[in-house]
Structure formats: structure tokens, C-alpha cells
Amino acid sequence: MSEAIEAHRNDFPIKGFHHVEFWVGNAYQTAHYYRAIHGYEIVGYRGPETGVRDTASYALEQGDVRFIMTGAMSPDHPIADHLRRHGPGVRDVAIEVPDAARAHELALERGARSAYESVVVEGERGKWKTAGILAYGDTVHSLVENPDEMWPPPDFRLRKDSIARSIGLERIDHVVANVELGAMDEWVEFYERVFGFVLLRHFDDEAISTEYSALMSKVVWDGSGVIRLPINEPATGKRKSQIEEYLDFYHGSGVQHIAIATSDLVATVAEARERGMGLMSVPETYYDDVPQRVPDLEVDIATIRRLNILVDQDDGGHLLQIFTRMMQDRPTFFFEFIERRGALGFGEGNFKALFEAIERDQAERGNL
């Protein structure tokens, strides 16, 4: 990494993903779904009972993964407008920084647009500082200064959850954006300029394509792996790509999926399937060449075949991954669960199988 890039990043130090906030139609029901099926503890609440009159929010936690589910209390709230246009989805991909006010100031100096000025969030348990900048579409990045590593947020009322049972999710691995045709390079340049990120991977439409559709993707990261941000845009194909379907139904750019790491994907997927989680499937023929394609894989082929887990390898090691089905009625947002056994990539060897699986779902919806 060049000295100029390193100095740029040192001016804007980043600790990692802090949390992700979803804007949803019913925060209560969404939080309880994530508790029952995905295993998140509901650890905090903010709403009318805590003095907040216009929204209701639930804070969730599993390992180091932290989510907030927020819904509006009236039809004229900005969240209601957001839902009308986009449906439920990710509003805020929050990033932890040592100094929120300084990070916000630097971001604006480097050409970012402000979502909101630096504020102090206080409660009985303490305080943190946060400021926000605008990203692709209607997505924002809150810049959170939380020296005491407090969760839930200080203005939330604590809740003790004795019901949730973890499925082994540990941390956010990467967050994937879908943007309009021609916008990918613009947003890559944005993250390089504002945060000092660098390009990690570049996949063109030949690498990510099927018989019918294609996409292009570039991955930016902070250089250490605590933040990875793949950015996708559609490419020309015979039929509508998954990215075009997303853009049509989300009505603009936004977060397509969040990849969450686990140290035992087999156990995670077995438990998720037991709870009835919808997961994508691949043809049986996918596993025929796994012993040749991933010869040193230390996992039972029959087990991953039964659970429909995808496998890949790169110079660093192996990778196991699986993708959920859509998390809402619109074909927009989903999750990936991933286990890295040394691999730094994103399952390049699985792209064709994955996108063919997505296309089968598209065809059922009549959108291919």
C-alpha cells in the first residue's frame, strides 16, 4: 500500500462495522422473527414508552453482529415514505470510528454529503457520539464513536432475552451494494476518496455470468479486512439480471445482502434449516466435481451436499457459504452465511451456481 494511501487512511481511522439499522413496516414482528429463526437476542427497546413518540426500535445482538429494527408510528414519517418506495430494507450501515465529529468533518472535506451533523446520544448507561454521511441511493453511513463499546445504544431501554438461541453467527463479514448501470466506478472512487479504501477484487461480466444474465462487481476494503464492501452493477445479458430485478423493485441503489461469518457453517445451516429458514438450493450436479475443485477440503462432502452448502478455495485457503432466500415480499434483500478457512475471496468458483439458483427464483416470480 502506498504511503499516500496509508496516510489518507490514518487520517480517517476505522474500527469496523458498528451496526446495521433496518427500516421496516413492523419493528416488533421483525425483531421477533429474527429472534425465533436467526437466533438474535432482543437486548433493547426505544419507543413511546422511553419518550420517543414517532418510532419504535428494537436492538438485536448475536456474537458481534448488531442490528436495529425501526418502524414508524405514523404514515407521514420519513420511514413510511422510505417503505412505500423501497419496501423493508437496510437504511444505515454504521461504521465505528474513534472521533465521530472529526470523521464527519473529514468526510465532508473529501466530498461526501452530510446525512446529519454530529450529535450526542445519551441515556442512563452513558453516551456515544454519532454523525452521518450519505451513500448510494437512500443508504447512509453513521459514524459512531462508542469508546465504552456500549450496546444497545444508550437511549435504549435494556431487555433481557432468555428465549433466543444462537445459530452461531459471529460478525459481519461484508455488506454488498447494488447500484445502477455506470455507477459502480463512481462509488468505488467515493470509498477510496472519502475513507481511503483500496480495491480488493474486480469481477467483470465474463467472470459473473450465466446463459441469460451477467453483472460486474468491484470490492473495496480498508486494507485489513474489518470492512469489505462489494459493489455490483448490471451488465448486458439476454434477460434481466438479478441486479436489474433488485433495482426495479427497490427503486434505486441499496444494500443487496449482508454476509455474516460463522466458525462452523455446517452447524449454523443445520440449525437454520431445523428452524425453517428459507435457504437457496443448488443442483445435485454442483457437488460432482467438488473433490477435484477443492481437493483438500476437510469437511464431509455428503454433509455439505445434504445441507446445500457451497465451497470454494483461493490462495489463502477454503471458504464455505450459503445464501438465504429473500427476507421480504420484494425480491431485494437477503443474507449470506460464510465460514472462512483462510480464504480471502468471495466464492468466485460458486458464482455460476449461485446466480443460476437466483435465476430459478427469478423465473418463478416471472422476472427473468
Image: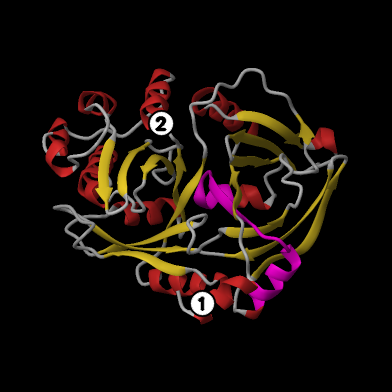
Magenta-tinted stretch: 82-108
* Lower sequence index among marks 2 and 1: 1
- The amino acid type, in three-letter code, at marker 1 is Ile
Q: Are marks 2 and 1 in contact (CB under 8 Å)?
A: no
Residue 368 visible in the current orientation: no
Identify whether 275 is placed above or below 195.
above
Identify whether 1 is placed above or below 267.
below
Badge 2 is on which residue?
264
Residue 51's image quarter?
Answer: top right
Q: Residue at x 69, y 49 (%)?
A: 76
Instruction: Report if residue 86 lies within the magenta region.
Output: yes
Residue 26's image quarter?
Answer: top right
Residue 307 visible in the current orientation: yes
Q: Is residue 122 left or right of residue 81?
A: right
- The amino acid type, in three-letter code, at marker 2 is Asp
Which mark is on residue 5? 1
Instruction: Report if residue 180 lies within the magenta region.
Output: no
